[in-house]
Image: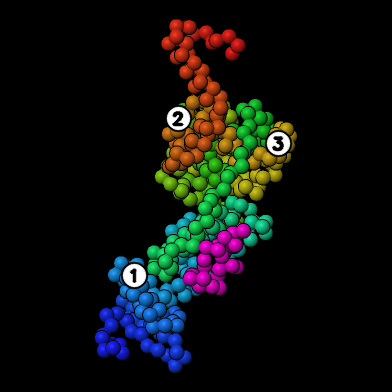
């Protein structure tokens, strides 16, 4: 189209409206439709500059239609979650976080309306309303993941979830029991749960992994328990066995030979019949649930004189710490824990100050030998 001077524009058109303002229009390279700038301009030059910017974005391959972000967040988030490959329990948790903590703020608006200041205000409001920090972190991570896909879909230019440190939180230090305290709880709990406590502490298996164990998973000769699956409980009460989160979750874990008599007695008196029978059962012979175990754990913990801050999961924490103290390497800890990354294993290695003292002592021996002082520690130590 020619402009008023008779020269044809290379890209787009500009015209003056009855109001005196200027309108810029161009052909969308994605849809082939004619698009108008989302606003009109005071001068023709302003309209020309805007068209030049759009043309440059098309050339660079960074172009997005001005109305791309008008997609409503709520339906987009639902569709995003629908197409994720998730375990039932993970899907249920994500649906809950989306419904309770994200949609009330962003659900009725568009993707383009979600800005960094709005995300920051939303996060602060959640924390101030009493929502736990782990839940707020999960909500932020979920929102960021959804909006990352919106960026990939070229609906928004960049992800507004850009708040430093909002995607993690400092986990408070959990209690570590002594071996004597572990046995005190095992002595105090119902006999059917005694081995559950001991295996949790000395194999570091999770509750769901313990609940899904079968007779055939226990090798008393080799002192090994084979982890093949984990039990999950949905909000509707349904129990289901599922594969571990990663290939590292399927693993053999050795237990101390001192537990063999305990396990032998348990297999004879409390485990379900048959090689595929569950190692642990509920009080009426059904599947083990957290809900039908919680009261027994609380009572045994109190009778043993263990702090009320200790959760059953802290037995796993205890076992990992004990294994690190016993000299387990990072790779060995990862294998026992069923982790595919070193992060958690390194945490337990950093926590064991007694091992650090042992290493320092060995270094001291090297120093004394190098200086010809023998193996005796220096006076005053």
Q: Secondary structure at mark 3?
A: loop
Q: Which residue is found at the position 45% from the left and 14% from the top?
A: 366
Looking at the rendering, the stretch of residues picked out in magenta corresponds to: 101-124
Marker disc for residue 305 = none
Q: CA distance from mark 3 to mark 2?
A: 30 Å
Disc 1 target residue: 57
Q: Is residue 140 visible?
A: yes
Marker disc for residue 307 = 3
Q: Secondary structure at mark 2?
A: loop
Q: Residue 279 in the image: state x and y as whole percent.
A: 55, 40
Instruction: Identify the mark nearer the N-term, 2 or 1.
Output: 1
The front one of 286 and 350 is: 350
Q: CA distance from mark 3 to mark 1?
A: 62 Å
Q: Quadrant of the C terminus?
A: top right
Frontmost of labels 3 and 1 is 1
Q: Quadrant of the N terminus?
A: bottom left
Left or right: residue 286 compared with residue 15: right
Q: How many marks?
A: 3
Residue 173 lies in quadrant: top right
Disc 2 target residue: 329
């Amino acid at each position: 189209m020619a402009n008023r001077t008779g020269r044809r524009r290379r890209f787009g058109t500009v015209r003056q409206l009855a109001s005196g303002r200027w309108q810029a229009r161009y052909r969308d390279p994605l849809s082939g439709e004619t698009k108008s700038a989302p606003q009109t301009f005071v001068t023709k030059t302003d309209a020309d500059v805007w068209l030049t910017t759009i043309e440059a974005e098309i050339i660079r391959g960074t172009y997005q239609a001005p109305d791309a972000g008008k997609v409503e967040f709520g339906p987009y988030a639902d569709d995003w979650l629908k197409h994720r490959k998730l375990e039932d329990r993970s899907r249920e948790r994500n649906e809950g976080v989306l419904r309770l903590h994200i949609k009330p703020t962003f659900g009725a608006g568009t993707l383009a309306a979600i800005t960094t200041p709005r995300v920051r205000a939303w996060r602060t409001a959640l924390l101030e309303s009493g929502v736990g920090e782990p839940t707020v972190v999960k909500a932020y991570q979920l929102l960021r993941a959804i909006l990352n896909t919106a960026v990939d879909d070229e609906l928004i230019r960049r992800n507004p979830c850009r708040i430093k440190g909002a995607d993690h939180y400092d986990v408070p230090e959990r209690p570590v029991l002594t071996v004597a305290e572990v046995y005190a709880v095992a002595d105090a709990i119902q006999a059917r749960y005694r081995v559950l406590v001991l295996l949790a502490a000395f194999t570091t298996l999770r509750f769901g992994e313990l609940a899904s164990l079968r007779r055939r998973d226990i090798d008393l000769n080799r002192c090994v328990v084979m982890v093949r699956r984990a039990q999950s409980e949905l909000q509707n009460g349904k129990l289901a066995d599922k594969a571990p989160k990663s290939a590292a979750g399927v693993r053999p874990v050795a237990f101390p030979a001192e537990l063999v008599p305990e396990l032998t007695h348990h297999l004879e008196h409390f485990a379900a019949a048959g090689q595929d029978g569950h190692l642990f059962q509920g009080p009426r012979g059904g599947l083990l649930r957290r809900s039908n175990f919680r009261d027994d754990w609380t009572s045994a913990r109190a009778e043993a004189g263990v702090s009320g801050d200790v959760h059953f999961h802290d037995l796993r924490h205890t076992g990992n710490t004990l294994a690190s103290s016993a000299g387990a390497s990072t790779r060995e800890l990862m294998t026992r824990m069923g982790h595919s990354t070193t992060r958690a294993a390194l945490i337990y290695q950093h926590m064991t100050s007694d091992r650090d003292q042992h290493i320092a002592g060995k270094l001291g021996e090297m120093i004394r030998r190098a200086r010809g002082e023998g193996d005796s520690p220096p006076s005053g130590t």
